[in-house]
Image (cartoon, grey):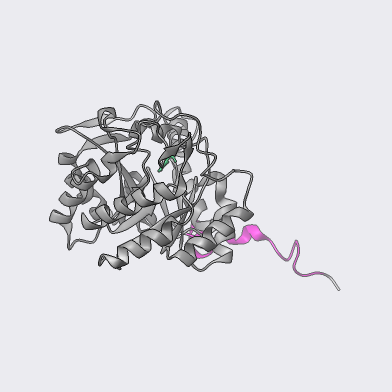
Amino acid sequence: MKNIDSYPNTRLRRNRKKEWSRRLIEESTLSSNDLIWPIFICEGKNVKKPVKTMPGIYRYSIDRLEKLVESAMNKKIPMIALFPNTPSSKKDNKGSEALNKNNLICQALKLIKKNYKDKDIGTMCDVALDPYTNHGHDGILKNNYVDNDETIKILVKQSLLQAEMGCDVIAPSDMMDGRIGEIRKALDKNGHELVQILSYAVKYASNFYGPFRYAIGSKKSLKGDKKNYQMDFKNSREALREVALDVKEGADFVMVKPGMPYLDIIKLIRDNFKIPVFAYQVSGEYSLIKNGINNHILNEEAIIESLTSFKRAGASAVVTYFAEEVAKKLR
Ligand code: PBG
């Protein structure tokens, strides 16, 4: 018998013939609900300073933050992520500034809590010491090695401080073993049982973080690399083990980072777990695409295409420096 499921009976181009038909068969779509917007904050008054490595991205002083929060709300962006640019005079080998009740992150959280407590916008903060250490590593160094258990003790304190200041989502990005469970326990014991944990469960030792490290001011200080705590980009089965542990320890969502070079990992986790997966389109990905557009090598639609690829792979949301610009278009 003739196979009817083949040309010329079947012509896949038929469904693509007109825009309305293409709209009917869309499998994934991007909306502003899918976006998390990272914002760099710095000291000073009325500062909006371009980040040299990331065209179109700025560091803002706290007094400029309200405008950004309002812009996010107007565009229906559900959450902003705050990242501090700590002056080097405040960095030391233990990252003590992370626990200062008046550091940049705490000031920002206090302001947002005061003005937008009952508004529909979430805040997310990284838990890790690299914005605060003079060696640029995410934890405490002992004989030049990031000490897991000593670091966790500080991360727990950092998490509690952020929760007290009103942070909605605590996002450990440090890759220490066992920190999710310890942070969850401490949050619950201190009355923060509704504070969510977004674990950067699968974070690779990546070459795509360079522009970010410049933005938060850890690039110059970083000694060596992060390969003994962040994952090797050759591995994917290990990602399943990382996620399994963090799910057991109480994570509410897990992150895969970077994004586009790791779409296979997003899909893998989506297919193997029920926990929501987020993707982080990191600074290097942003700058590549943005420079491509600025130099007329790519057209702007490349942004939406890159972000939709995360949805297709199975991500629930994407952390992206394009959030504000894209949300404007999606509305
Ligand atoms: C640090 C952290 C990094 C990023 C987010 N949190 C960099 C690193 O691990 O060195 C990278 C984000 C980006 O490149 O956009 N804990």
Residue 178 at x, y percent in the picture: 46, 57
Name the residue rendered at 26%, 45% in the picture.
99
Q: Nearer the viewer, residue 51 or 77?
A: 51
Magenta-colored span: 3-28
Q: Is residue 211 above or below residue 113?
A: above
In terms of image quarters, where does ligand 1 lie?
Answer: top left
Q: Is residue 9 left or right of residue 144?
A: right
Check the image and name the residue furthest to the bottom: 1
Query: Is residue 262 part of the magenta span, yes or no?
Result: no
Q: Is residue 73 left or right of residue 241?
A: left
State whether residue 55 appears in this view.
no
Check the image and name the residue furthest to the right: 1
Residue 258 at x, y percent in the picture: 49, 45
Residue 298 at x, y percent in the picture: 49, 35
State whether residue 118 appears in this view.
yes
**The C terminus sits in image quarter:** bottom left
